[in-house]
Amino acid sequence: MAATDMNASQASNRTPRRRSLSTKENDDEGCPICLEPWTNSGAHRLVSTYCGHLFGKICIEQWLRTSQTCPQCQSRVRRRDLRWIFCRSIKTLDTSERDNAIKERDFERRAKLNLEHEKVELQIAYESLQQHCLHLQQEHDRLLKLNQQLNDTKKMTNESVQSVPIAAISNPILTINLQLEATIKTPEGMCRVLAYASSSHLLFISSQPSSNSHASNADYGIKKISLIDGIRSIEYISLNHTKPIRDIQLYDTLLLSCAWDKTLRIYNYIQNTTDLLCECSSQVWSCAWNLDDPNLVFAGLNTGRVQVFDRRQTQQNETILSSSIETLDFSTTSPILCLQYIQKSSHFHANGLLVGSNDKSGFYEYISNCEYHFHELPIDKNLSSLHYDVLTNRLLASFRPQSNPARHELYEIITTSHQSFQISLQLIQTFLGSSVNIILSRSKILHHNAETYVVASDNRAHGIEIWNIRQTEKIPLYKLSTQCDIIDSCLARQYLCLLADNQLRLYKWS
């Protein structure tokens, strides 16, 4: 009997120790009131209070009979707030390492995003510097080319003077010999302007497609003619103008065109892509590049205003620019017939825009930040064309015939910049042309064999008239009949190119 009591006593002594050890090892699995393990059924099954603490059902019910608060947090608890928990066991996991890893991951993500933003900003700055470097390289090449032209002109002038006999020095003007080499017909007509790219030997003519092409009759574009080793190819390129083109101007590999459909278009004639469409407020009669910053282009409107567009104002992946950054009011209601950008040089002490209309001419001096100062030029009304020659610093102004024949006045531009920029004109020579005017044409100053000539249309004889700027006579030095009314002219390699409404005639000048 004593042995039995002793065994029972020992068993009873061992059981609490095991329970205490289990509770110590798994204190998160026992009731905090009685310290006994929870059960999943019966009176001591697991329940949760409203505040989220866990107890045995019988223990918390007995507790709430004497106190209406949670044994753990002392918050108010009612018996109806108890909720049964259905689970086999509950263990609290140590997630501190995981939480720290998540924080480190989020920090690295933010650092990565900051690096990506910095990379984008650096890429944009790099591309901007690349464009600036390209602009500087183009400017360097242009200045080298201009310097070479000046050296060649000086050399040819010296050679021509040395080759002329002493008896002929009093009359050194050479005779002109033009031989027709080719005629390119455009039966559809609507040819208005010429442009020549000397770097690629490409000649451009504004026109509309032939009746055999798939293009619409209302689709106006250009003809691109290669003059490498003669006339090798003729290609029509649509510029998607819906009305006739009035002017085209070249810069590097870009062609700027304007038309009566109230648009400017920039076309890359090497890549054959349209880079930009500028929507103007009215019909466009003339256009020009800003040669100091080719991101800026000018549009001369039929309302007597000049709109200035900045190609950088377009959004990414967009090719339409609907608003200008500046509008220059020329204070006239006549169309802007002539636009020409003049760069600062040793004999022209400012850069800006030469503008001519039927009843007014002037120069917009560029100040800074798209600010311009207007200088009116003392040129008569009834103007038909205006052309500035950078090599000779001469300005050619042509006037339509009225009671007198057409006049072509040659001026020297005089500029000063002591305190402020001032511009004036000195008349050098007046040449008298045709007494008939049928179509609006462009007179040009052209250089050939170290000589400088004025070329103008002769509507009376259906041809052209040529003067040497060193001659004293007002009558033409040379007259050429072309059987058509010439609208525009230019020099392309050894050819004098004459454009009429429906044909291009190329003459070899010797």
Image: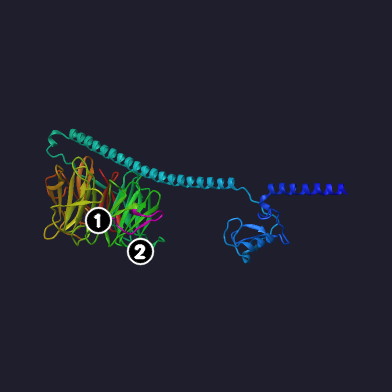
Q: Is residue 324 magenta?
A: yes
The kind of residue on which mark 1 rests is Ile
Name the residue nearer the viewer: 72 or 327.
72
Q: Could you tell whether 328 is left or right of 473 in the image? A: right
In the rendered image, residue 403, in percent from the top left (x then y), is placed at 11, 60
Label 1 residue SS = strand
Q: Is residue 146 visible?
A: yes
Q: Which residues are magenta?
A: 313-327
Q: Quadrant of the C terminus?
A: top left
In the rendered image, residue 114, in percent from the top left (x then y), is placed at 45, 46
The kind of residue on which mark 2 rests is Ala
- Circle 1 sits on which residue? 487
Name the residue nearer the viewer: 127 or 136.
127
Q: Are marks 2 and 1 in contact (CB under 8 Å)?
A: no
Distance between mark 2 and mark 1 Cα atoms? 22 Å
**Residue that appears at 13% across and 33% down:** 166
Q: Could you tell whether 47 is left or right of 216 in the image? A: right
Q: Is residue 441 visible?
A: no
